[in-house]
Image (cartoon, rainbow, N blue to C red):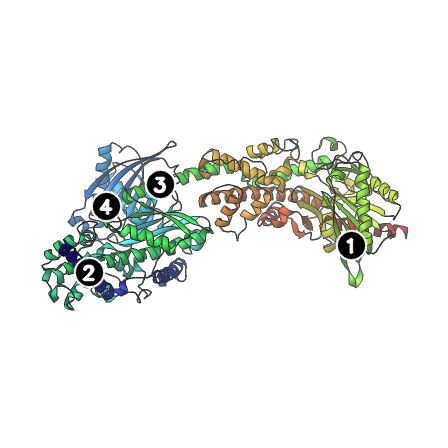
Amino acid sequence: MIASHLLAYFFTELNHDQVQKVDQYLYHMRLSDETLLEIAKRFRKEMEKGLGATTHPTSSVKMLPTFVRSTPDGTEHGEFLALDLGGTNFRVLWVKVTDNGLQKVEMENQIYAIPEDIMRGSGTQLFDHIAECLANFMDKLQIKDKKLPLGFTFSFPCLQTKLDESFLVSWTKGFKSSGVEGKDVVTLIRKAIQRRGDFDIDIVAVVNDTVGTMMTCGYDDQNCEIGLIVGTGSNACYMEEMRHIDMVEGDEGRMCINMEWGAFGDDGALDDIRTEFDQEIDMGSLNPGKQLTSCFGEGSEADLFEKMISGMYMGELVRLILVKMAKEELLFGGKLSPELLATGHFETRDVSDIEGEKDGIRKAREILVRLGLDPTQQDCVATHRVCQIVSTRSASLCAATLAAVLRRIKENKGEERLRSTIGVDGSVYKKHPHFAKRLHKTVRRLVPDCDIRFLRSEDGSGKGAAMVTAVAYRLADQHRARQETLEPLKLSRQQLLQVKRRLKVEMERGLSKETHTTAPVKMLPTYVCATPDGTEKGDFLALDLGGTNFRVLLVRVRNGKRRGVEMHNKIYSIPREVMHGTGDELFDHIVQCIADFLEYMGMKGVSLPLGFTFSFPCQQNSLDESILLKWTKGFKASGCEGEDVVTLLKEAIHRREEFDLDVVAVVNDTVGTMMTCGYEDPHCEVGLIVGTGSNACYMEEMRNVELVEGDEGRMCVNMEWGAFGDNGCLEDLRTEFDAAVDELSLNPGKQRFEKMISGMYLGEIVRNILIDFTKHGLLFRGRISERLKTRGIFETKFLSQIESDCLALLQVRAILHHLGLESTCDDSIIVKEVCTVVARRAAQLCGAGMAAVVDKIRENRGLDTLKVTVGVDGTLYKLHPHFAKVMHETVKDLAPKCDVSFLESEDGSGKGAALITAVACRIREAGQR
């Protein structure tokens, strides 16, 4: 008993010693995590070079665009055909995808051989043979009468220019069909089908096997965005952001990149880890550093990285190591056999067999004996260890490059922790007993901040080609459906000209005494009869009241050489109880704040002229008399509606008995904006606000303002254009989404133009469109979240942020995530498109309105051309990245006889009220002289 234990111990120690000897001999092939991370870093650099337009030609990793722009989302459906051509046999498949709440794929396929004479004949013969096999398959399934879409897996080196266009660079794998290299293989198969004339198909996509693998697995796991093949050869693909792919136009969305990573290291990036055995394999090739010798398949491409990791070379690496160790008398007693010396006689499947869970040492003996050797136990143990080291290095190198890909995807998405799936195929991954496990463990060790799932492709790349086709059809169908929905929001030039004409008609109605009462565009007189001329001077106070906060301003206007405006202001809040109290309490609070400001400025007791910007609906009877029609914006102070706000302010000042002010003018914010800009530019005769709300004013000829006596001179008219369309004149342009927003607003049926163009409503229009898309399965995978149902959640500021040119799609996704909307990259593109369409329509409508205004001014004055400036304020105009540009272009197009400039108001409507007061004082003083 003791003797048997001692014998077992002796053999264990012998085995252990032999393993250590092999480990020492092959220490260069045992890679540390530090080395692997360095390899990942170098690979990442080559990826970036491959994506760059200027660096692409010199990159060893070519990063080829595939024009596959989306992975499956589970809503694909329909019948598809697929061809899978990558060797001496090819498959034809029929794939039926069902989306009825339960994803289901039915498949029929048949394998067809390609005779050697056809492989080496003409291209016409080859593609006629493929078309004949396709016809045979369709006959068998009785589907020849259907025009089905087809995906083509073509696993040869190609230059792809479109999803359905791929030019063969060179034949490999024993093919030599003439007249094919340099040609588009899709065109060749189409012509072969046309020559037959007995069936027709729609070839939608051509892909390689790696992309096919990603798409096959992507249907089962929608987190799958990487494809990996580790078999006879090796390659990977992944979904890259379009903004990083210089070789393809466009910055939005993603595209699958075929990495062609087998050539990694061709530039010397792996020289420090390549061994003499790697070099021997490479130097034995017809084209060292690239092409393999004919013993591995004539013309088969496999570059330096692929030679270190793929199944075609794993067995040969083991053979070369065994030969060298034998020559150095470390194995087989220094004896060699002709079989061991013969290239290709130690196969990769032998490596898998030797590393099997059971009887690995016995298997090693069998294989070594087959090679004409007489191995000892230690020789078998050593061979087993050599196999382990070679296959482990292969898995480790593969893991390092995958780590680089995962790190890039993680950074592209801007996520703290990436969750991703890798779809895998290939005989080494599937059949080697430990390769997959080693690969998984090493990847997770190298990228600990990524949750990675590996998913085996069970149905091959043929199904993947069908899935690419299914996705392409889904995207086309969904795009068509979305465009049909968005089409009514895209206004033609003819429609915009109609808007311009209709507004001019409504302006005339508002100005006329006879039709004013029924006119929706009220064209209210402001009694502002002049704009600044630069001679204004003096100190003026201004109040700017239009919300829960208000400003008190001191504006010092200087003329002559020191011409300019100096401004001091202070913001005060209005407590809720004051907003909802009595009118006396509200105006007493305002006067208290004025007193505080005067004391703050060291001007207590000084009497100054004051301008009052009061941005609530009013009927103005003179420059210093304005009757409040109705409180808005949350105000409910009693005893104010129907009263003159200037009188209420003066009474409050008198009650305080501390100072006196000369209230010269009361204006709204639009007029204030025009006057502020008018001080900077004497051509400014139009004011425009496009923010939370929208309105415009302009200088109208007094003869046309029938509500006010007198025909001489001009007067600023407050258009109140937000109500344009309230009489139904814009019904043909309003969409179901405008109607939905209007119906749930505080004032249904009112302010219809404002609801189409202003910041308060654009976000709601977008939200309603997104709900419609989601209900129809065109967005968010058809899942409507509770957050999306919440009114007001999609604020207009998000439109501005989402449309920002410098904002990447990952930031769009971050905004949607902040709103509680889980989105894919494709969802982000769609949301951005909706925002663009809605904002563009608003800008165009605003531009059409402005074109009507400036053309009216030109016609009023009988001019052939008019030079005029529009003073503009409002968050939408100022903050949206494209609104202003689109509006300017529209005005220029619709009012070609007007030279229109736009000047942003930088100091708000409060300064405008002070300038109106300054102009009024100038005119009053001139009249007194």
Q: Earlier in the sequence, mark 1 or mark 2?
A: 2
The residue pinned by badge 4 equals 127
Residue flagged by tag 1: what amino acid is it? Asp
The residue pinned by badge 1 equals 533
- Label 1 or label 2, whichever lies nearer to me, is 2
Q: Position of residue 329 (x, y in %)?
A: 14, 68
Mark pair 1, 3: CA separation: 70 Å
Above or below, comparing residue 833 to residue 293 in the picture: above
Mark pair 1, 2: CA separation: 105 Å
- Label 4 or label 3, whichever lies nearer to me, is 3
On the question of residue 3 being in view, the answer is yes
Residue flagged by tag 3: what amino acid is it? Tyr
Disc 2 element: helix
Q: Position of residue 527 (x, y in %)?
A: 80, 43
The residue pinned by badge 3 equals 219
Q: Earlier in the sequence, mark 1 or mark 3?
A: 3
Above or below, comparing residue 458 to residue 263 in the picture: above
